[in-house]
Image (spheres, coloured by chain):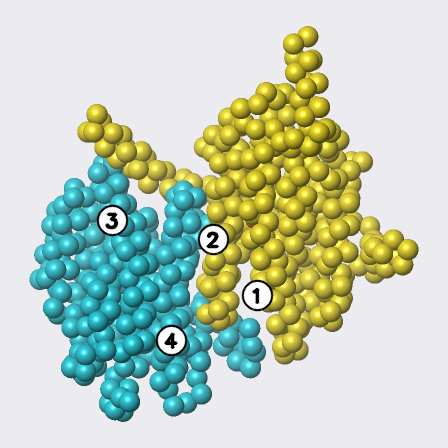
Amino acid sequence: MYTDEIKEAQKEYLLRLADDRMILSQRLSELCGHGPILEEDIALTNISLDLLGQAKLYYEKVAELSDEEVTADDWVFFRDEREYWNVLLVELDNEDFAHTIVKQLIFDVFEILLYGEMINSKDADLKAIAEKSIKETKYHLRHSHEWMLRLGGGTEESNRRLRDAIEFLWQYTGELFYTDEVDDILVGAGIAPDVSKFRDEYYKTLNKILVESELEEMDPNVWMQSGGRDGRHTEYMGHILATMQYLPRSMPDAQW
Amino acid sequence: MEDLKRLEEFQAKIDAGEKIEPKDWMPDAYRKNLIRMMSQHAHSEIVGMLPEGNWIQRAPSLRRKLIATAKVQDEAGHGLYLYSAAETLGASREELLEALHNGKAKYSSIFNYPTLTWADMGAVGWLVDGAAMVNQVSLIGTSYGPYSRAMVRICREEAFHNRQGYEIIAELCNGTEEQKEMAQDALNRWWWPSIMMFGPSDADSPHSEQALKWGIKAEGNDSLRQKFITMTVPQAHARGLTIPDPDLKYNEETKQWEFGEVDWDEFFNVIKGNGIMNRKRLKDRNAAHDNGKWVRDAAAAYALKKKTKVA
Ligand SMILES: [Fe+2]
Ligand SMILES: [Fe+2]
Ligand SMILES: [Fe+2]
């Protein structure tokens, strides 16, 4: 049995993982039916579905750890913006297909390294989720990586769009490595991975893909945006939640 | 002379219940009729993603969101599968899509109605996928091999969608007063358009007779429509819902539900492009295609570069 301190830290940690995936999935689902080719409608929807499934597993585990009677859905539909802990990256607008791909790549490379460590977690549930998810993430990364190559090496326009996307989204990579006492407690207990261990590898991998995609390397040590882990979001966030939550909130007694 | 003999052999094959395969000889009109029908079907799958995609972001629980997302993904898969099947007849996906986007090709008129409440996600699954399923089960018997095989696979998923849609409606009917009203309202709005999905009465259907003779269609519009109604009415009653047709009555002798007058004026107007969502659906499809052009161009340019490098 975990101490109360670990339990509380774990709830917080799981919510961060869950919120990242939930909001990224929600953003991706906006593209359903609007993709550049039918194959991408299928692929992006599939990725959205995987992320949603992962988020659900994390929310369910938070609900399990809670003393109150709460369900996974309560966490999704009845928290306000300032109580959502996702990184800013995942809530940003879809803009164009280049932004979608770069956003995914930034997330996928991180996720593959994270899950690569999390499969050694001492927490059996986390370990199991990581083992299941890493298979999905490999596919996601292959998808975003391949599109990086195509867009970067395709036409002048696609290369320019891709460059615009990476130049804008780069400042949102740093937050993925945010840690605080929640991480300290869980890393110490062997439950959560120490993300600082793979920060160099992360940026090296990203930069390698950028060069392969006929783009310039980017500097990891520039000013990075943050705030999501503390519930300080972009203006997009309130709109995402307004859409996502309106129905359960307008009829709080209803079952769906 | 030659052609007449081939035509006779062709018809004999169909009458014997054999399937026509892509490499077999077929009359030009048979090929054209099939391309028209299969591409309309493919277009319906992808346009159908729009009214349901409209609710994915607002699905009221994690479970419903997962199911709704997976369903719309299935429809995209159906579209892809059907375009590929149509390509076996020598039509390219690009030219078929072009006909959809410039308004020349048709898709199922049902998708020109709006999804207004969450209950519509139930009604669409239950009624629209239900009607599609009845139609498509019969199309398993179509004489064109690739189309028939596509139907086998697709029908399994449509049956699933039909059940999931009904489950949404059932949950609403078990719920609060507001939820029950929502379910009844959705049934009121989707019932008649679903009935119309089978197309005009066989007597008024321009393509029906030849399509039946060549085994492209295995069953007429009216008989399929009746099947759907007889299957669906008891499902509505089981949930305490009222079918919005004052003339509906059960015929003890035939064991069928007889129904009232269909508003064909509305049907033909929606087909002509006067439905409330016609313009928006085509606008969204065109926007997706046009905004995706630079992506497709990039993929093509990259593939070409890679090929020349290897060569
Ligand atoms: Fe379908
Ligand atoms: Fe269908
Ligand atoms: Fe379906």
Q: Residues within 10 Å of mark 1 (few under 14, many from 20)?
A: many
- Same chain shared by disc 4 and disc 2: no
Camera-near label (3 vs 1) is 3
Q: Where is residue B158? Give x, y as percent.
A: 59, 53
Distance from disc 4 to disc 3, alpha carbons, whole Å, reads: 29 Å
Give me the C-alpha separation between circle 2 and circle 1. 18 Å
Distance from Cα at disc 3 to Cα at disc 1: 37 Å
Q: Chain of mark 3?
A: A
Mark 4 closeness class: few <14, some 14–19, many ≥20 residues within 10 Å = many
Q: In the rendered image, which quarter is residue A222 located in?
A: bottom left
- 4 or 3: tag closer to the N-terminus: 4
Using a 10 Å C-alpha cutoff, classify the residue at mark 3 as few (fewer than 14 neighbours), some (14 to 19) or many (20 or more): many
Residue A60: image quadrant is bottom left
Label 2 element class: helix
Q: Which residue is mark 1?
A: B118
Q: Residue at x 65, y 54 (%)?
A: B130
The total of numbered circles placed on residues is 4
Are discs 4 and 3 less than 8 Å apart at CB?
Answer: no
- Three-letter amino acid code at the position of disc 1: Trp
What is chain A's hue in the picture?
A: cyan
Q: Position of residue B106 (x, y in %)?
A: 60, 38
Colour-to-chain, yellow: B
**Residue ID for mark 2:** B73
Image marks 1 and 4: residues in contact by CB distance under 8 Å = no
Nearest the eye: A193 or A204: A193
- Considering every residue shown, the one lying at the far top of the view is B1
Residue bearing the label numbered 3: A145
